[in-house]
Image (cartoon, rainbow, N blue to C red):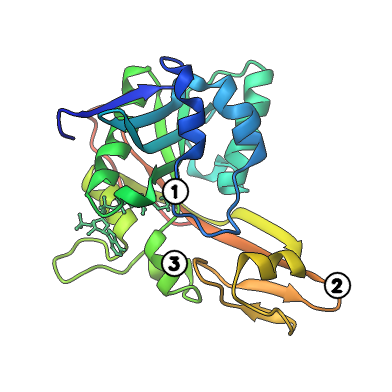
Amino acid sequence: MTHSIRTFTLAQRPDLLPAFLNLDIPWPAFIEPNRLLVEWGIHAHAEHQLIVLDGDTPIARASSLPLHWDGNPQTLPSRGWDGVIEQSATDTYSEATLNMLCALEAGIDARHTGRGLSQSVFTALRDHAREAGFEHFIAPVRPSGKTEFPEMPIEDYVERRRDDGQRADNWLRIHERIGGRIIALSHTSMTISAPLDIWRTWTAEPFTTTGLTIVGGGIAPVYANTDLDYAVYIEPNVWVRHRLTDAPAEEGQGS
Ligand SMILES: CC(C)(COP(=O)(O)OP(=O)(O)OC[C@H]1O[C@@H](n2cnc3c(N)ncnc32)[C@H](O)[C@@H]1OP(=O)(O)O)[C@@H](O)C(=O)NCCC(=O)NCCS
């Protein structure tokens, strides 16, 4: 990052909470802010929420929550991204040992995407996890380029590489470049369900037939049921582990 770019936690700068929340992160409309994260997590764990300023202008944020993990990929939350937030709340209240920091979002304001900021922002969060003394740092990564391949199984998608050997997916590529290794897949990482009228406002689709529908910004199809008047989207994510010590990272097995 250049000298004019500074990173703060919300614990250091609680005055930046409105700016943190109001960044224009380019999420599809159906991925709304998670209420447990917004109304509980970022307050209970303000020290793990990063905001990035360019001069005095907020340009990016990185959100994370702590939880307990025994280091076994099989015991990661089965509900992936959703499950991390839920488990962080229960682990926090049960006073479990919070030995893992889990990244939940690295978001660049829409006016500042394409500047190469994402790697710096995620690296800042990883370095924060190290400095805070966590044993583990992990992310249920949303492979953002999969919007172009929503019907491809996640197992096949993560194997795609460019001719130069780097990962084809732009966000997985950044993770691998800074040392992240895939240790598991989550097929049920984020679940969004709503009546069809709401889905029509979120997307350009009419939802007039029962079955799978491809929606803009989705990395998986949406299942709609017109008899029951609902549609549900279940997003797969990729568990990526970033080592916080100098020990060599090993490639894991997808689950
Ligand atoms: C995903 C996101 C963080 C990437 O940030 P960004 O500032 O747009 O990306 P960068 O400029 O840092 O580029 C990162 C890589 O993606 C590539 N890239 C950037 N925009 C791209 C696009 N529209 N399509 C394909 N690749 C793209 C870049 O070339 C770069 O790869 P390289 O270093 O190998 O050349 C940002 O788009 C975002 O906030 N998206 C919404 C939230 C999200 O999905 N976050 C990630 C999951 S939590």
Q: Nearer the viewer, residue 147 or 107?
A: 107
Ligand 1, by image quadrant, is: bottom left
Q: Amino acid at mark 2?
A: Leu
Say whether disc 1 or disc 3 marks the residue closer to the N-terminus.
Answer: 1
C-alpha separation, residue under disc 1 versus residue under disc 2: 32 Å
Residue at screen point 37% across, 65% down: 145
Q: Secondary structure at mark 3?
A: helix
Q: How many marks?
A: 3
**Vertical relation: 234 (above or below) 66:** below
- What is the secondary structure assignment of the residue under circle 2? loop
Are the residues flagged by discs 1 and 3 in contact, CB closer than 8 Å? no
Q: Nearer the viewer, residue 197 or 48?
A: 197
Label 1 environment density (alpha carbons within 10 Å; few <14, some 14–19, many ≥20): some
Which dot marks residue 228? 2
The residue positioned 46% from the left and 16% from the top of the image is 11
| Whether the residue under disc 1 has CB within 8 Å of ligand 1 | yes
* Mark 3 crowd level (few <14, some 14–19, many ≥20, 10 Å Cα): some
The disc at residue 25 is 1
Which residue lies under the disc numbered 3?
155
- For residue 207, side relative to residue 41 (left or right): right
Q: Which residue type carries mark 1? A: Ile
Which residue is located at x 19 percent, y 29 percent?
A: 4
